[in-house]
Amino acid sequence: MAQVYFISETKLKDYTSINDNVDSGTLRQAIRTAQLINLQETLGTSLYNELVDLVDTGDITGATNSNYRTLLDDYVVDVVIQYSLFYALDDFIYKFMNVGLVQGFSEQGSSLDISTFKMIKNSARDRAEFFDNRLREHLFNNENLYPAYKTSTTDGTLPGANTDGIISSIVLDTPMYSKDYDPTCCKDYPYKAKYQVGK
């Protein structure tokens, strides 16, 4: 299967605080990680692969694939942008060098303390989870538009397989099996898109 990037490095820089001078290789790796881990987990492998194929062949722009184009442009792109920033932050603070793991330093700025870095990472994750939940809600409410959603594969992931419904770091004080728990209230979800890096 072709390696398809749903966003370009330029788009990632345009919609985040990433400086134009940041190395392209770092951003490409962050985009790839965001797609393979978070997006594929939300969409499920079948829908993810279908979206990759549509982007790779250019069929995503066809009139019969307008639902997939909406999925990509209105939902998937935002998820990939925010999770890419989340993963790229690690590479911004340290690098693997011949001498070992080193912290980045610039003449124009001072090093970042760990508590500030954690705050920035948490903020990036919160934004990514917001857009991921938005995608999941769209898939939940429109799963009939995407037949590959909920389709199992022998070597892939079902949509939302690692979470139960909406992603959240908030812990509610209601036990799952309390008398108030309604097992029919929630449902698992998934999502995807194509823009070649550098375009």
Image (cartoon, rainbow, N blue to C red):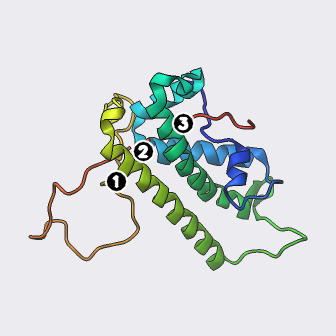
- Residue position marked by numbered label 2 in the rendering: 41
Q: Amino acid at mark 3?
A: Ala
The kind of residue on which mark 1 rests is: Thr
Q: Amino acid at mark 2?
A: Glu
What is the spatial separation of the Cα atoms under label 1 and label 2, in whole angstroms?
9 Å
Within-10-Å neighbours for mark 2: few <14, some 14–19, many 20+? many
- The quadrant holding residue 172 is bottom left
- The reply to whether callout 3 and callout 2 are in contact (CB within 8 Å) is no
Residue 52, percent across and down? 53, 30
Q: Is residue 120 above or below residue 25?
A: below
Q: Secondary structure at mark 2?
A: helix
Gap between marks 3 and 2 measured at Cα: 14 Å
Which residue is under mark 3?
193
Q: Between residues 163 and 143, which one lies in front from this camera angle?
A: 143
Asked if the residues shown at circle 1 and circle 2 are in contact, with their CB atoms under 8 angstroms apart, the answer is yes
Dividing the image into 4 quarters, which one contains the C terminus? top right
Q: CA distance from mark 3 to mark 1?
A: 22 Å
Specify the quadrant of the image occupied by residue 19.
bottom right
The residue sitting at 33% across, 72% down in the picture is 171
The numbered mark, 3 or 1, whose residue comes first in the sequence reads 1
Q: Secondary structure at mark 1?
A: loop
**Disc marking residue 68:** none
User: Does residue 2 appear to the left or right of 182 in the view shown?
Assistant: right
Marks 3 and 1: which is nearer the front?
Answer: 3
Residue 178: percent from left, percent from top: 12, 70
Residue closest to the far right:
107
Q: Residue at x 74, y 57 (%)?
A: 95
Figure check: 66 above or below 57? below
